[in-house]
Image (cartoon, helix red, strand yellow):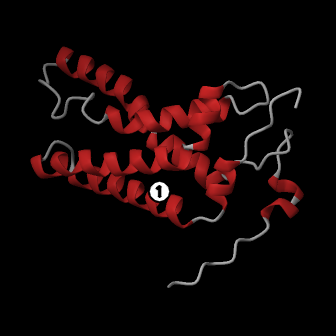
Amino acid sequence: MRAMRPVPDITRDPGALDDEGTLRVPLPLAALMVFEARYLIMLPLAALTDFLSRGAGMGAPVLPPWLLLPASLPALAVLVAWARRRPRAGRLARAAWARGRGLLAGGAVLDLALLAPVAAGGGLPGTLVILMALGSLYGLIYLLRSTRVPAVFADFPETEGR
C-alpha cells in the first residue's frame, strides 16, 4: 500500500481565505477552468472566421466548430458555480461546486477523446492539437495530484441564517 502524502494545513495562511472565509481558488485552478472552457470562446470566433473566409472565397472550414464544444460544458458549470460561490447560492451551484473536480477531470478526458479523431483526421493543424491535448493532460494531472484542489471544492460558504 502506498503511503499518503501529508496534506498541508493551508487554512493557516491568511491569504488563502477570501472575504466569505472560504479557500480562494488558486490561480492554476482558475486558469484551468478558463482553459477547459476555451471552446465556448473559440466557437463564436470560428463562426466569424468561417463567415469571413466564405466571403473571401476561401471555402469551408476544415473542422466544424461545434464538434469540440461538449468538452467545455463541464467547465462552464464549474465557472458558473464559482461565480455564484456566495452564502446565498442555490443548491445547483453548491452541487456543481462540490463536484467541480470530477466535472473538470471529466471535461479534460472528454477533450482528449474528442481531440484524438480530430488529430487522426487532420482536422486541425498538428501543433495546435498537440498543444491542446498537452494542456488537457496537464490539467488532468493537476486535478488528480493537487492537495489543495479537493479542499477548495469541498469549501463553500455556509447559507445565511445558519
Q: How many numbered dots are placed on residues in this image?
A: 1
Amino acid tagged 1: Gly
Left or right, residue 122 beside residue 87: left
* Tag 1 secondary structure: helix
Question: Residue drawn at (37%, 23%), measured in percent from left and top?
Answer: 44
Residue 38, picture quadrant: top left
Which residue shows up at 68% across the image and 56% down it? Answer: 151
Above or below residue 147? Residue 21 is above
Residue 134 as seen in the image, left or right of residue 101: left
Q: x%, y% of residue 50?
A: 24, 22
- Residue located farthest toward the top when viewing the structure as drawn: 55
Residue at 84% of width from left, 39% of height from top?
Answer: 20
Residue at 31% in and 27% down:
46
Residue named by callout 1: 139
Above or below, comparing residue 62 to residue 134 in the picture: above
Residue 102 x, y percent position in the rendering:
49, 49
Quadrant into which the C terminus falls: top right
